[in-house]
Image (tube, rainbow, N blue to C red):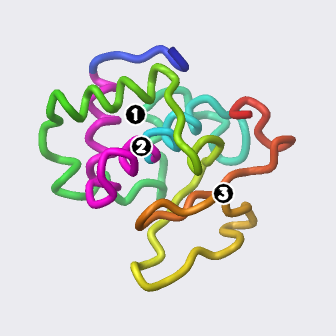
Amino acid sequence: MLISYTDRDVDLLARIMRAEALSDGELGMLMVGNVVVNRVISNCYTFKDITNIYDALYQKNQFTGVNSSLFQGQSTEYEKQLAKRVLNGEYYYPATHALWFYYPGKSSSCQSTWYNQKLAGRYKNHCFYKPSPGACQQIY
């Protein structure tokens, strides 16, 4: 287990994974989960005071998915299983060390940097960005 979590954390993580990456399928949803967990683990940048899933999701101006109807609906058992996989330490490239992701549009390519962070890679609709190892040692 990467972080301690409650049933509420599992539900919240499952719902944000669905809201942010349902169109990218299971693997895309798992990668979004990686980013959320990385923010809880890290002690860098604007994530220094993030200590749980709730804080990560509701940090100001971070996850637009919390306003989505996909987030508001109840999570399924399948989605909860995906969330538990991430919470228990499964990682998927390019989100392995990522703290950020965004959707540039289907016909647009990923920027090489985003908010001064290096592109880790793209999976379907999302670009993932990681800090340098020296800046956020906890996620490396």
Q: Is mark 3 on a helix, strand or loop?
A: strand
> Dots 1 and 2: beta carbons under 8 Å?
yes
Query: Which is nearer the N-term, disc 2 or disc 3?
Result: 2
Residue range highlighted in magenta? 8-31
Q: In terms of image quadrants, where is residue 113?
A: bottom right
Q: Which amino acid does label 3 sit on?
A: Ala
Whether tag 1 and tag 3 are in contact, CB under 8 A, the answer is: no
Q: Name the residue under label 2.
A: 57
Question: Mark 1 or mark 3: which comes first in sequence?
Answer: 1
Foreground mark, 1 or 3? 3
| Magenta part, dominant SS | helix
Considering the numbered disc 1 on the image, is that residue within a helix, a strand or a loop? helix
Percent position (x, y) of residue 11? 26, 30
Q: Residue 120 carries which label?
A: 3
Q: Residue at x 60, y 48 (%)?
A: 99
As shown in the figure, which amino acid type bears the numbered disc 1? Tyr
Q: What numbered label is drawn on residue 54?
A: 1
Identify residue type, mark 2: Leu
- Mark 3 nearby-residue class (10 Å; few <14, some 14–19, many ≥20): many
Compare residues 76 and 46 and report the one nearer the observer.
Answer: 76
